[in-house]
């Protein structure tokens, strides 16, 4: 556990607070402690077919516990009836077998306050247990230590165990309706996002097949027993949970993984209706459908559903392929020489070639919204502008993220300029073409302008 990497949250970190709704609850039941998890979870290759319709939402409450910790849990689920209304207490569960996707609220919140993230999952065909954490929910003192000491992550594991047990509990409405072999999903925001990340790291639960931590911080080194598809969602101006900490957490996890950045926003605006809410929910539901239903159509929607003018996405081992585009060469207006990626992976890009060969050809990959990536034809690697302004562009990346994404600018003289998405600086050819290309220019001139030719 890397305690020194964590960002401690003040008591101001919270999801929106809402009144706790009273639901009819079965008698309190103390389930056994969560078992020791296998290091090789047996997830089947053919989970249930993904639903093709929206469901109405039902909700039931269970009075569970872990030791002396009360874990009131409201389970939202696909129900019979017409979709679009509020959750109906005790509604009959819809026909079918559904994956489980737990949700953890933020500090001062509860399941109702996170309806924008819980209801879409239930409507899409997931059973969503949402615990009310005993020390960080609305009306409590807000003991955030229960996140850092692992209590909340362990609570979630207990809730997963209890929910799975309902599938074989005689007389329970969920009996026979829960997918107990595909693996489970987990998600949460703020303290709930940290709780989620803790289940992948310091307090691992190998039953987890998919995770979406919203606005989390790094809770430790990845566990070796968890094999999960992980989507991070974060605002790059988050003053509560540092964006850099979530990026570090992302870097440390193995693929498949992705990171959805909401540029220019803070801790939670993208969750509620309005600012990029549509992109957040669509991407999140796509992720769970792909991970737990093997829904390849949802996987293929990810890029489009995540895209807006103020979002940035990083994908690793997620998409089967990126869109294709024409093969192009770029000739600098500053010296009339072509950009070359010779020895890509070792040497930077330079604009010093008089003729076009394999090392001067790039696939211009259309990423949508006038964004492109450049893939060197000679080695199949993407051009990267990481540390632009200090380091040169180099064609050595196997995946496309913010530093491999460029905004195409069509200039009035017919040339094209490229602006790195990650820092909004233009690509320029330095020192009359003898120096490497860098993305550190704030204005467009001859050295930032390129003639684009195809073939």
Image (cartoon, grey):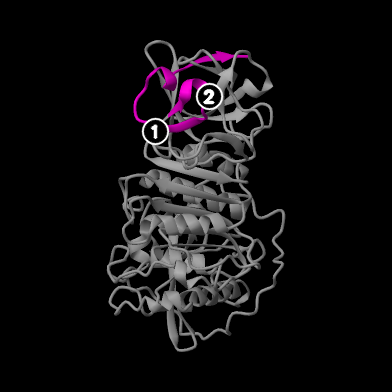
Q: Which residue lies furthest to the top in this view?
A: 413
How packed mark 1 is, by other alpha carbons closer than 10 Å (few <14, some 14-19, many 20 or more), is many
State the extent of the magenta-drawn residues as a range.
427-455
Q: Which residue is drawn at 68% across and 21% down?
A: 358
Q: Where is residue 411 in the image (x, y as percent from the top left)?
A: 39, 16
Q: Which of 433 and 81 is in front in this view?
A: 433
Name which quarter of the figure residue 181 lies in: bottom right
Q: Which residue is drawn at 59% across and 49% down?
A: 290
> In the structure shown, which secondary structural element does the residue marked by tag 2 occupy?
loop
**135 to the left or right of 400:** left
Q: Which residue in the structure is indicated by mark 2?
A: 434
How packed mark 2 is, by other alpha carbons closer than 10 Å (few <14, some 14-19, many 20 or more), is few
Kindly tell me whether residue 359 is visible in this rendering: yes
Count of numbered marks: 2
Q: Residue 425 — which label? A: 1
In the rendered image, the quadrant that contains the C terminus is top right
Q: Residue at x 49, y 14 (%)?
A: 335
Q: Is residue 284 above or below residue 431?
A: below
Q: Which residue lies furthest to the bottom in this view?
A: 68
> In the structure shown, which secondary structural element does the residue marked by tag 1 occupy?
loop
Name which quarter of the figure residue 39 lies in: bottom right
Work out whether mark 1 precedes mark 2 in sequence or the reverse, and give the earlier one.
1
Q: Where is residue 241 in the image (x, y as percent from the top left)?
A: 37, 61
Q: Where is residue 117 in the image (x, y as percent from the top left)?
A: 41, 56
């Amino acid at each position: 556990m890397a305690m020194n990497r964590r960002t401690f949250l003040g008591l101001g970190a919270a999801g929106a607070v809402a009144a706790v709704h009273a639901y009819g609850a079965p008698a309190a039941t103390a389930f056994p402690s969560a078992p020791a998890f296998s290091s090789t979870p047996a997830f089947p290759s053919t989970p249930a077919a993904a639903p093709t319709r929206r469901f109405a939402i039902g909700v039931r409450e269970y009075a569970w516990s872990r030791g002396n910790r009360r874990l009131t849990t409201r389970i939202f689920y696909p129900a019979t009836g017409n979709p679009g209304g509020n959750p109906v207490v005790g509604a009959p569960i819809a026909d079918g077998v559904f994956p489980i996707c737990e949700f953890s609220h933020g500090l001062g919140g509860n399941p109702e306050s996170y309806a924008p993230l819980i209801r879409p999952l239930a409507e899409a065909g997931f059973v969503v247990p949402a615990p009310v954490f005993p020390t960080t929910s609305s009306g409590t003192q807000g003991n955030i230590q229960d996140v850092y000491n692992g209590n909340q992550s362990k609570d979630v594991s207990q809730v997963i165990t209890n929910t799975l047990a309902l599938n074989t509990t005689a007389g329970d409405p969920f009996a026979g309706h829960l997918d107990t072999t595909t693996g489970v999903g987990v998600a949460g925001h703020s303290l709930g996002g940290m709780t989620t990340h803790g289940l992948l790291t310091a307090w691992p639960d190998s039953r987890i097949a998919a995770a979406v931590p919203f606005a989390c911080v790094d809770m430790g080194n990845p566990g070796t027993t968890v094999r999960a598809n992980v989507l991070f969602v974060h605002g790059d101006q988050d003053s509560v949970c540092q964006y850099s900490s979530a990026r570090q957490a992302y870097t440390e996890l193995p693929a498949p993984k992705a990171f959805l950045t909401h540029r220019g926003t803070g801790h939670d605006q993208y969750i509620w209706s309005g600012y990029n809410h549509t992109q957040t929910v669509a991407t999140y539901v796509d992720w769970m459908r792909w991970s737990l239903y093997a829904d390849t159509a949802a996987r293929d929607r990810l890029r489009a559903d995540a895209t807006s003018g103020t979002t940035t996405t990083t994908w690793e081992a997620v998409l089967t392929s990126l869109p294709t585009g024409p093969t192009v060469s770029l000739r600098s207006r500053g010296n009339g020489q072509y950009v070359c990626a010779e020895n890509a992976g070792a040497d930077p890009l330079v604009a010093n070639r008089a003729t076009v060969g394999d090392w001067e050809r790039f696939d211009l990959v259309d990423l949508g919204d006038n964004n492109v990536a450049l893939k060197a034809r000679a080695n199949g690697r993407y051009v990267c502008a990481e540390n632009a302004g200090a380091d040169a562009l180099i064609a050595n990346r196997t995946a496309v993220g913010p530093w491999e994404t460029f905004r195409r600018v069509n200039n009035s003289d017919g040339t094209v300029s490229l602006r790195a998405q990650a820092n909004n600086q233009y690509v320029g050819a330095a020192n009359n073409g003898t120096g490497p290309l860098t993305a550190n220019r704030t204005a467009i001139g001859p050295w930032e302008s390129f003639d684009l030719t195809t073939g």
